[in-house]
Image: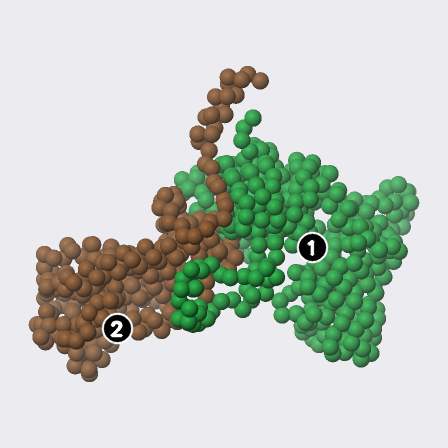
Chain colours: A brown, B green
Amino acid sequence: MREGVAGNVGVQADLNVVETVIQPQRGWSAIDWRKLWEYRELLYFLTWRDIKIRYKQTVLGVLWAFIQPFVRLVVYTIIFNRIAKVNTDGTRFEGIPYPLVLYAGLIPWLFFGESLSRSSQSVVASPDLITKVFFPRLIIPLSSVGACLVDFAISFLILIGLMVHYHYPPSLTIFLILPLIILTILASVGVGSFFSALNVAYRDFRYVIPFMVDIWFFVTPVAWLPDKIEKGRWLIGLNPVAGIVDGFRSTILGRPFAWGALGISIALTAIAFYAGGMYFRRIERQFADMI
Amino acid sequence: MSEPAIQVEGVSKRYRIGAREEGKTFREALLDTLATPFRRLKSFGRSSHREEDSIWALKDVSFEIQPGQAIGIIGRNGAGKSTLLKILSHITEPTEGRVVLRGRVASMLEVGTGFHNELTGRENIYLSGTILGMRKREIDARFDEIVAFSGIEKFLDTQVKRYSSGMWVRLGFAVAAHLQPEILLIDEVLAVGDAEFRKKSLGKMGEVARGGRTVVFVSHNMAAVEGLCQDAILLSQGVMVERGPAEQVIQHYLHDGLTSENSTTSLVSHEGRQRGSEVILQEVRIFADGVPSTVVKMGGLLKIATVLKRDRPLRDLCLVIAIEDHAGRRVAAFTPQFQAAELLMDSVNGGTITCEIPRLRLLPGLYYVTLLVKLGEYLMPKDLDRIERAVQFTVERADVFGTGCAPHPSAHGVFFQEASWKFDPE
């Protein structure tokens, strides 16, 4: 054997070889961003799959993404505004038609609620992927949230329609919508991953989720405004989505921000994102054994 | 000397059994946390288990595989083969030990991984390919080959839910077969499709193995293992029993594993039992040519004695002894219904049913016995107790016709039969 040549080939091969070490993990493990980036194509395909399937399976296809928010808008307006007489008098949003105020807050809520419902089921609904292939499992709830982005985008179209209808021009603060969108996505991913891992670890958790989302809607100032509440307003702020919803409203309608609430939301979202991810990673190792 | 492609060091895997059926409920966890918050926090994420409730699916397995080697992993059901493969595939983690893999790894543990019914064949190729680890540009490059291999050109843009199971399987395998990793892990997926497709699949895998990739192949199909692999590892109850040239290990497995001690198998807690079954089957004993053994000569006498026990009477029950070949095909079924329908007419609660097959017509090979007990006379009989692959036996070559010339399974099917011949010249 020609030593020189063999030696060089050996080194060359080692430099290009991907080495994987599999051993028992103990304690908490961080989110592996590099691996997630490596598998970004898979994230794209799974998201695409979710979107395609959702529209193929629903009765009206893409139309459903328009109908849902619109019907909610109408029903909530009738119930909250016409019947329960919730209105914008004496609040930051005085003078703006209720439907518009409602809808500006509804957009982020719909995205959050839908992402939560879908991502919490996502892992449990894919046992074949979990038990037969390897990839960073965080991609599964991520793709669920990603699929909801399409509905999110469509709900903005309805917003444009509403603003045209009420002759309400967008203000300059509309550009703040981008960081708020990112904040909403982070909140959804954080809570969604947390719930999806909980769903695998505890079999009965899935029954709690619809209930939680339901109540969460009422506790969040979507169909009502926190401005008129004097005592205990800080309690509302403990809800990470509260500040986001309020922020969306202020941005879209060009009215004052509730900076305190937004600040709390940002902090809580960061915690949810970090803690949710960590919990997911911890339970992830046992997914294949639990499902 | 290059580094091994796969290094397995002291790998063990423990599973919790029993308690897992009930699972942990959120309600329990919540109450636990409220009652003793600190204890819960300390063991957060870790579930407690007691020693008696666990089994070791793998215990201290160590081996190395050099790049370019193809190695088969064989053993009985429950020996730990699939668990080992799952660990190598990074799907589950070992309880102890570690594994080092050098190279891109792809696992074929199932056909059609990631397929979704609502998507078309074309879309599923991309989806499944990506899930299995191919980059989009790789799928683009091999797309035509994949379609050609699967033979479903005409249905490429039809939704997969309209495919026949054969087409589904061919497409699934075609995608997986075109993975080009450095290390390929295969679990039994070559036993799919019709005979022709199986031959094509085996051929393709042979190509892959000869192409210098490292292959780990788990299978019950000894012929395939021998054809594909140079070496083989024999696992028994989670422990690595032997590693050596494939033919040698296979012979060891077929013969030594089936001595008279193993000719009696307890069925009380057999892992092949279908969930929800009543435990009626207690034990099965195999006698070959008159002695307790699971190796019978072609054309020899095979006796299967099954012990049944029940709190209620056994009357009107029906026992079925189903025999499958190494590839999972049902080749024969024996039941008293055919010849002795009144066998179980007494109101006794237990006993032994003996089935004697005088001149076993099966060709040489490995066979599995699935046992089931059902209510005999109803139109839609439901299995009261069913155990898949309860026990196995081997048929050995023998000169059945006394002429020195006898049929062989590679060319002559699954059974032999005497025939008389006549020639009338013109």
Image quarter hosting the N terminus of chain A: top right
Subunit under mark 2: A
Q: Position of residue A148 (x, y in %)?
A: 32, 60
- Which quarter of the picture shows residue A243? bottom left
The residue drawn where x is 83% and y is 73% is B343
How many numbered marks are there? Answer: 2
* Nearer-the-camera pick, B50 or B392: B50
Q: Position of residue A197 (x, y in %)?
A: 41, 60
- Which quarter of the picture shows residue B319? bottom right
Q: Position of residue A85 (x, y in %)?
A: 16, 81
Q: Position of residue B404 (x, y in %)?
A: 88, 41
Whether residue B338 is visible, yes or no, is: no
Task: Say if B60 sits above or below A75 in the image.
Answer: above
Q: Amino acid at mark 1?
A: Arg
Q: Are marks 2 and 1 in contact (CB under 8 Å)?
A: no
Q: Nearer the viewer, mark 2 or mark 1?
A: 2
- Number of residues whose C-alpha sits closer than 10 Å to that of mark 2, classed few (under 14), some (14–19) or many (20 or more): some
The residue drawn where x is 84% and y is 49% is B297
- Number of residues whose C-alpha sits closer than 10 Å to that of mark 1, classed few (under 14), some (14–19) or many (20 or more): few
Task: Say if B397 sits above or below A262 in the image.
Answer: above
The residue that label 2 is drawn on is A219
Q: Amino acid at mark 2?
A: Val
